[in-house]
Amino acid sequence: MEIDWTVLTYAVIGLFALTGFFRGWWKEAITTIFLVILLFFLQQPAIAESFVAVINNIISLIWKILPDFITQFLVDTLGLGGGSGAVGGVPQLDPTSGTTWLLILILFLIVAILISRPFLRNYGSTGYSVRPMGSILGGLVGGLNGLIIISLVREYLDGRNLPQVTATIVEPGAQVGVTSTGAIDVVNVPSLTIMDSYIPWAIMLIGIVVFLAAVKNRVAWRYQDGFSKVGVKEPLGYKKY
């Protein structure tokens, strides 16, 4: 099986741009800030390792308060708490593993969706419908999210920017067999990556600006009767119904 990485990149960007077109830019902006955080972790491996350590501490606390029959069920059915991915019988994430960061990426995407849906409802008797301007901006922000996501996946597979890890880098244009029973060849890999030079910082700056615009367009601050009051307002490109 052969995978053209350039074609895959265009497909992912197009898919997220289409999703953003229907969701609108505000919801896509919530996803953007989570992706920017992951991109920042790639730039700062020590901070990334500390982040995983915090998650592992939370897992340890939860594992200790779970009833024995639940932990035993998780061990028997999912293999959690055993093998190299566990410390003292407690499942732990490995910050040097690309698989760990792929799981965190999926978790971040889920959290972004769970946050954006109730804060800008488009269901029920009242909510906000996306207008043409919101759709156009949503397509642009969604395309940016797609670019960041596929780039993060490439970095996680390469592993070169993960904490304390020796990378197996997918070289530009390389063919890499990844299975013993059948090869998956990755071809047409661009030489330019999201981690080159100033590119990650430029993308992070754009992401932060997009997120701040989302906050400014949704949160309404006003000073009344000697008190500061916080409310919500209709974002650009949306219409309340």
Image: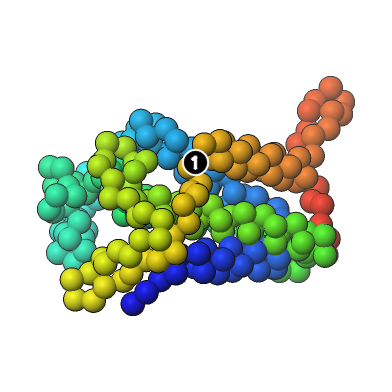
Image-based side of 144 in relation to 187, left or right: right
- Count of labels in the image: 1
User: Quick one: quadrant of the N terminus?
Assistant: bottom left
Identify which residue, 206 or 168, lies in the foreground. Answer: 168
User: Quick one: quadrant of the C terminus?
Assistant: bottom right
Residue 91's x, y, as percent?
Answer: 21, 49
Residue 59's x, y, as percent?
Answer: 29, 44
Picture residue at 70% right of the left edge, 57% below the top = 140
* Category of crowding for the residue at label 1, using alpha-carbon neighbours closer than 10 angstroms: few (below 14), some (14–19), many (at least 20): few
Name the residue tied to disc 1: 196
Residue 176's x, y, as percent?
Answer: 30, 64
Tag 1: residue type?
Asp
Identify which residue, 75 or 65, lies in the foreground. Answer: 75
Q: How is the image coloured?
A: rainbow
Picture residue at 78% right of the left edge, 45% below the top = 217
Q: Quadrant of residue 228?
A: top right
Residue 44 in sight in this render: yes
Q: For the residue labelled by badge 1, is the local secondary structure a helix, a strand or a loop?
A: loop
Picture residue at 37% right of the left edge, 41% below the top = 161
Residue 19 in sight in this render: no
